[in-house]
């Protein structure tokens, strides 16, 4: 699953909680600084992909006439151009490799900034972070379905995409994350 910017704070918080609960880590400045550093690194990674995708869209827009003449599927062409340019923009397209890389970056940053200390191997620590990301992704769709079902059962009907809908969705989403121990 592709992670988007709104997910970054939740994933970062899950990483911090999972590190704390692992029993392998001591936090030097508490949970919040760890979560914020992880969030920053996740957002930087997501921003790189966003910049790449914007550039790919520009290229496709510039060549729209040729693509239409040759009857090229825009979605397939988008993927091919993105794949070709990914390395130039520092974007890893394989989610498994990407999450692994981000987990290493987060661990290195937390340690370099003296926010955590640990006495086990670096690989064990990286795996905790990687697993946090994977677990969040696996539970995201489940939580989203639960929240949407709650909204549908409400007496007043909310219009998807409206400010009120988004506010209620966000509140219920946070409640569900808290209930699952992810916030």
Image (tube, rainbow, N blue to C red):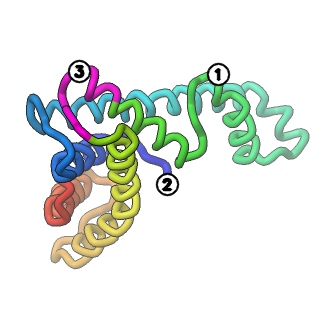
* Residue behind mark 1: 88
Q: Residue at x 86, y 46 (%)?
A: 71
The picture places residue 64, in percent across and down from the top left corner, at 77, 33
Q: Quadrant of residue 116?
A: top left
Mark nearest the camera among 2 and 3 is: 3
Query: Quick check: can you spot residue 155?
Result: yes
Name the residue at 16% across, 77% down: 155
Magenta-drawn segment: 108-119
Front one among 154 and 97: 97
Give the percent coordinates (x, y) of residue 101.
Answer: 48, 36
Q: How many marks?
A: 3
Q: Whole-Å distance between the Cαs marked 2 and 3? A: 30 Å
Disc 3 crowd rating (10 Å Cα; few below 14, some 14-19, many 20+) is few
- Which residue lies under the disc numbered 2? 1
Above or below: residue 78 compared with residue 51: below
Q: Is residue 111 on the magenta stretch?
A: yes
Q: Is residue 77 left or right of residue 17?
A: right
């Amino acid at each position: 699953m592709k992670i988007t910017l709104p997910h970054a704070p939740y994933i970062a918080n899950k990483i911090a909680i999972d590190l704390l609960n692992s029993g392998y880590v001591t936090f030097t400045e508490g949970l919040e600084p760890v979560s914020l550093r992880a969030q920053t690194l996740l957002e930087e990674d997501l921003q790189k992909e966003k910049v790449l995708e914007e550039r790919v869209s520009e290229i496709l827009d510039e060549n729209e006439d040729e693509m239409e003449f040759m009857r090229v599927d825009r979605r397939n062409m988008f993927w091919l151009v993105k794949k070709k340019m990914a390395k130039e923009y520092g974007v890893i397209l394989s989610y498994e490799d990407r999450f692994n890389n981000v987990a290493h970056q987060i661990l290195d940053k937390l340690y370099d900034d003296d926010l955590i200390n640990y006495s086990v191997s670096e690989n064990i620590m990286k795996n905790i972070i990687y697993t946090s990301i994977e677990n969040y992704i696996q539970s995201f769709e489940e939580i989203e379905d639960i929240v949407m079902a709650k909204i549908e059962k409400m007496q007043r009907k909310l219009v998807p995409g409206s400010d009120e809908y988004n506010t209620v969705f966000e509140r219920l989403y946070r409640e569900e994350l808290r209930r699952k121990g992810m916030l």
